[in-house]
Amino acid sequence: MDKDTGHSIENQIFLRKSFLRFFVPSVLSSLALAVGGLGDCLFVGSQIGTDGLIVIGFGAPVYALYSLISIGISTGASIHYSKALSEGDQQKGREIFQNTLLFIFLIILTLSVLGIIFRPTVLHLLGVRDTSPVYPLMYEYISVQLGTAPLIFMQAPFYYFVHCDNNPKLAAIALVSANVTDVVMNYILIVILKVGILGSIYSTICAAVITISLCMFHLLSKKTVLGFGRSRVCFRHVTDGIKTGYATNAQYAYQFIVILTFNQLLMRTWGENGVACLDVVTNIGAVVVAVIEGVGLTLQPMIATFYGERNKKNIKNTLRYTYLWGGAVCALLLLLIIYFAPWYCPVFGLAEGDVLEGGIWAIRVFMLSIPVTFTVSVFSYFYQTIEKERLSYLLILISEAIGRLLFGTLLIRFGFHSFWWCYLCSELLTLLILVCYCLSKKSFLFLDFKEAVFTAFLSSKSEELSQVTEQIQNFCEEQGASIKQSYFVTMVVDEISSAIFMRQTKQAIYIQLTVVKENEETFVLHIRDNNQNDYNPFDTDTSDLHSEAENENAIGMKLVESKAKEFFYRQYSGFNTLVIKI
């Protein structure tokens, strides 16, 4: 087979299909989440007016703080979950899930109780004075907001873990259904029933119940590793998740600080209308930012899996697909939002004179930063996943905090219109620092694995299999394996590949093979095939065999099973995957 053609088929069979399987539901679910937030802004702005937008704007830091805990930790923990399963460690994966749920619930519950007890202090910290006309409305809003947070923010761990546990479709259905419910309930409660601004919180509660309920179907299925059985309490799993997810955590922490600061800056220069304008810009911009977050949801489980396999080629091609598909969707939304900005503002309550003109200008200038934000964010998600957390932290710190606060406080002195350029300036500064750092290290991807790695791509041709087994034997010998160990590794590849190809029907079967020298005593085999039916070679039932070849193959599987130190099978991203340690 021609080498380039083989790579093309391999990308088409294993990578593009897997990427789109994650990308489409991830982007749709992230967009649904953004549209849900947009619905709050839309109905509150149109029915309650500027006062409603001001209250939501002042309450945004509270949601940012809870997102800091819930989404940030869930993201990092789910990455470790994906890595644990890619290495065949089911018990560790289950412990990560259960400990993450427990920790998030306890910390959010504690903060909510403290917040309710000290509500006047919380309002003061948010910048709402008791002399403000919106103080009574804000007091009522913050009370319900804090009281319902333990339920609302338990959505994140369920969503992220189900997404990474080979069910991105159900995770997307759960989030999309929840946010459709959020929008519909917003309309019913705020527009029809005239409940007022609290309707936006009640609708979010309904959405949370939908998300958690649908995700529970996955947890109750037989194919999942997730569950609520007995498991040891090990907060090291949580701290590992916090460490890896800190870039996401930091993003929400910085948003909390930036929103508080920007609210104060705009209050001084443009009054409460400035806060309302910032809220509209943030919510509309969140639609495009949601695509970027969807890209992260696609990128991270795939990169985590390939990184665990030490498959450098698949990692690079995943990044190429990310920029191709994610960049195209971002560009389309960017152009639509810029063009239709004059229509959006009146719908959200910015409908008069300078307020309307300022809103249009703010939206369009903010959108100009999105292409750079997309580039920086993809690298940040990537570095976060390959355990280069410090570099990811640095990018988020500069773009989300230092850059925005620096340029925001500087540009506000030149007027309201100049202020909005702070987003673009911040992202450009971050990109410049990233390029300079990577050039100094002579690498952008940092994929210099210490382990020796062999990769191959097989179709159902016997001559290809014999050539590959010979190459694997040479690889093992070069890495200092004994004759016995080299024999066992090649035997396992031959037996399992033959078993997989024997199941071929009308569909062409392909195998992606990676052999990693883990240490002096162990080689790890990662075997992925595209058979549409679940097929675990180690589950062969000898009573159902119909041919002598199948019987010989079953005997071979029993021999492989007896010689393997560990083995783990799962259906992942539409493919059968095996991890075997020899």
Image (cartoon, rainbow, N blue to C red):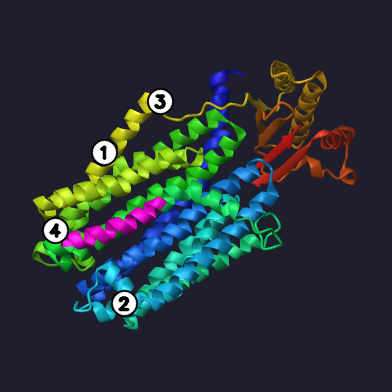
Which mark is drawn over residue 13? Answer: none
Give x and y (percent) for residue 414: 9, 50
Is residue 255 highlighted in magenta?
Answer: yes
The CA distance from mark 3 to mark 1 is 20 Å
Magenta residues, start to end:
250-266
The CA distance from mark 3 to mark 2 is 50 Å
Sequence-wise, the earlier of marks 4 and 1 is: 4
Give x and y (percent) for residue 488: 80, 26
Which quadrant would residue 37 be assigned to in this image?
bottom left
Q: Residue at x 47, y 65 (%)?
A: 153
Can you tell which of label 3 and label 2 is closer to the viewer? 2
The residue that mark 3 highlights is 441
Position of residue 518 relative to residue 235, above or below, is above
Can you tell which of label 2 and label 1 is closer to the viewer? 2
Sequence-wise, the earlier of marks 3 and 2 is: 2
The residue that mark 4 highlights is 358
The residue that mark 1 highlights is 428
Please state the total of marks drawn on the protein image. 4
Query: Can the viewer see residue 188?
Result: no
Sequence-wise, the earlier of marks 3 and 4 is: 4
Element type at mark 4: helix
Specify the amino acid type for callout 2. Pro
Position of residue 308 relative to residue 141, above or below, is above
The CA distance from mark 2 to mark 1 is 39 Å
Sequence-wise, the earlier of marks 3 and 1 is: 1
The residue that mark 2 highlights is 120
Q: Nearer the viewer, residue 7 or 163?
A: 163
- Label 3 with label 1: CB-CB less than 8 Å: no
